[in-house]
Image (spheres, rainbow, N blue to C red):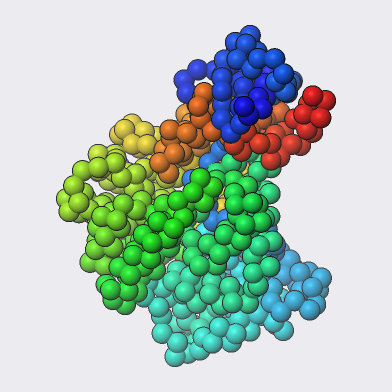
Amino acid sequence: MPARTLYTHATVFTADGADAEAFVVEGERFLHVGTEESARRAAGPGAVEVDLAGGFVLPGVIDAHTHLLMTGQSLQKVALRDAADLAEIQARLRRAAEQAPDAPRILGAGWLYSALDGAAPTRQLLDEAVPDRPVYLDANDLHSVWVNTAALAELGIDDTTPDPIGGRISRDPATGVADGMLHETAAQQIVWPALARAATDADRDAQLASAFEHYLAVGVTGAVDMAVQDDDLAALRRAAHRHGGALPLRVRGHWLVHRRNTAEENLGQVARAAQLAHEHAGDRLRICGIKIVVDGVIDSCTAAMKEPYADGSTCEPIWDRESLTPVVVAADAAGLQIALHAIGDEASDIALDALEQAHRSNGPRDRRHRIEHLESVTEANVRRLAALGVVASVQPVHADPAIQDNWRAVLGDHRVERAYPWTEFLAAGATLTISTDAPTAPHPPLPNLYVATTRRSALDPSLPANLPGYALDLADALCHATRDAAYSCRAEHHEGRIRAGHLADFAVLDADPFTAEAARLLRIRTLLTAVGGRVVFDAAGTATLAAAAS
């Protein structure tokens, strides 16, 4: 019989409609959840006891939209999200270059358009800081990359390089010379592969290990990797091998489908995803579907909107209806889950049209398709989404008031008053799941929940709330990050709740978020994280000491 562990003296948020104060873990699963008295009876003699000393226990958080390898990579890049202005960005780059004189290139992440105070991001501004080697700076949303002159040369981009489908190599309007900004598929299909070729498998292994370590330390026990490609999958396989066949946390992957020139190429990627789903269907590593980036982002005016931006510009989607619908229908027929990035209101229209066609073509069944982000969406499409049973996958940290100035300015009209309308999805009857989309935002879940429940800034709590009428209830938000996140990846029957028979994935916090002011969410620490009953992070040594004493 597997060993039993009795956990006592806790406040247990089960995400199952009832609270508890103790629970028993046997092997990989919860054996019993309830009062201390009932848990002691269930544990029986000889059980290891762990006194949680009043800690707050919740189901392990499942980050339902993240990018694991990219998160690990971003942790090694020059951090720019909090850079106040251009001078600070340049100063950090100069400092990084001075500290690593032999580094072949300088990589940064997280810069915001608002830090430039209206100035255009150009290669010359980066040349001023680092002229002697390539510089690559991921925008905060990861949908564009700002590079210097040396990086353009390294990429082989010159005045004659054509824009890839769905992307743009930004150019000086007077001369036509590439100015250093690479948008959407120009980043995904030119920059990302180039940097991947420049890295080694050892680099990627260390970066993925860092992502796992950081996630487990904040109570995250599962992740949905939302743009898996060959390098990601190879790194995940190697990590599983190093850990005896089981990754440190549970990973579901959506294979990224790029828009190509022909329908045959597009459908070929669906066939590849279906084969990978057949090959990787395990408990800790499963390819469950595909990811399609239908449009861009509002900050760089590449999201597909029904009305023009404040400057009068418009932007076509990356995938139009003609190209998208056959891919969605084929993936649906293959039983794959489909995750559709749709930020603009026109993009969600396109996404829902394709999903409706899949329903008509392939008949009724439980699908669990998802639309990601939904930052600007019409009321009609909120209702359509709910009626189709599509999961609304949202990232509260993207609504942080500290990064909203440019977002609101580029729309500049009535649309900013219905930004990130999370409660509308719930009112319509949709399932809502919360995630971070790291590294486009910090990966810890509690600051994310702070933004979700207050609409205030986790980066600068002094700022006024961003449309507080759309704030979520804390208990609901915890469920969206656990129970509903499990539902979103077809795992609700064994993950996402603290319930007898479910996998024992849980986290212990040092304070009860329900008994403190909301800002406490920014300071609460994770004390312990367990995956499948095994403690994988123990800040205070509580479980380790208890096990040793037994």
320 on left or right of 5: left
Q: Within the image, what quadrant is residue 287 found in?
A: bottom left
487 to 106, vertically: above or below? above
Residue drawn at x 30%, y 68% as measured from the top left: 267
Q: Residue 549 in the image: state x and y as whole percent.
A: 83, 25
Front residue of 105/26: it is: 26
* Position above or below: 243 against 12: below
- The mark tally for this picture is 0
Q: Nearer the viewer, residue 281 or 326?
A: 281
Task: Please give left or right for residue 18 compared with residue 204 in the image.
Answer: left
Choose top left, top right, bottom left or bottom right for residue 412: bottom left
Please name the residue shown 46% across and 78% down the image. 169
Q: In this orientation, which residue lies closer to the viewer: 67 or 118? A: 67
Q: Position of residue 317 (x, y in %)?
A: 33, 65
Q: Residue at x 47, y 81 (%)?
A: 171
**Res. 375 in view:** no
Residue 196 is situated, as x and y percent measured from the top left of the image, at 58, 73
The single residue placed furthest to the left in the displayed view is 360
Q: Residue furthest top?
A: 37
Q: Position of residue 420 (x, y in %)?
A: 42, 44
Identify the image quadrant of residue 298: bottom left
Q: Quadrant of the C terminus?
A: top right
Q: Is residue 259 above or below residue 441?
A: below
Quarter of the figure that contains the N terminus: top right
Q: Is residue 280 visible?
A: yes
Near-viewer residue (72 or 108): 72
Q: Residue at x 70, y 15 (%)?
A: 45
Image vertical order of residue 155 relative to residue 114, above or below? below
